[in-house]
Amino acid sequence: MAAADKAFGGVDVLVNKRRPGYLSRLRKVTTLRSESCSMSTTYGAVDMIKAGCRAGVLGSGHIVNISSMTGLVATRPTLHSSTKFALEAVTEALATEVRPLGVKVIAIERAPSAPTGRRGR
């Protein structure tokens, strides 16, 4: 963020996007894996938002959190869905917090897609 602020004079749009992490049944997920998924999906977005606000997104910018339909309607995989619900809550609360400062905050809920990577193609 500091490099973008220096090079471009601030940040107009901040987009948070994270790939699905662990698509396993909850009963098979270790505590460490659960914490890792929550940290990267929810707290990763929060950390980027805080950095974006320091880099000048306040005043006229936009914050876009890429979420998922599983953040609106709980489905399997449970862990993925729960972290997206948390991201939706952060988005809604943040929107009311920064609206008076001229910042627009939205979430884009993507439709489910076929799994890739470790689980096949």
Image (spheres, grey):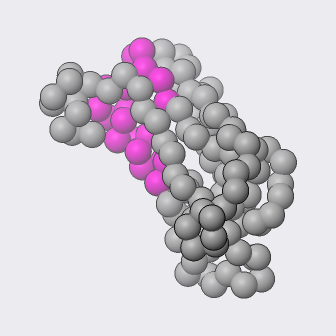
Residue 93 visible to the viewer: no
**Residue shown at 42%/32% (left/top)?**
14
**Residue shown at 37%/22% (left/top)?**
12
- Residue segment shown in magenta: 44-63
Residue 33's quadrant in the figure?
bottom right
Residue placed most toward the observer, 115 or 43: 115
**Residue shown at 43%/20% (left/top)?**
61
Look at the picture and state if 113 lies above or below 109.
below
The stretch drawn in magenta includes residue 66: no
Look at the picture and state if 94 lies above or below 46.
above
Residue 17 placement (x, y as % from top left): 51, 45
Residue 95 placement (x, y as % from top left): 60, 28
**Residue shown at 50%/60% (left/top)?**
40
Q: Quadrant of the C terminus?
A: bottom right
Q: Quadrant of the N terminus?
A: top left
Left or right side of 76 for 66 = left
Residue 29 placement (x, y as % from top left): 67, 81
Residue placed most toward the observer, 54 or 37: 37
Prevailing SS of the magenta stretch: helix
Residue 112 visible to the viewer: yes
Look at the picture and state if 82 lies above or below 51.
below
The stretch drawn in magenta includes residue 56: yes
Left or right side of 98 for 14 = left
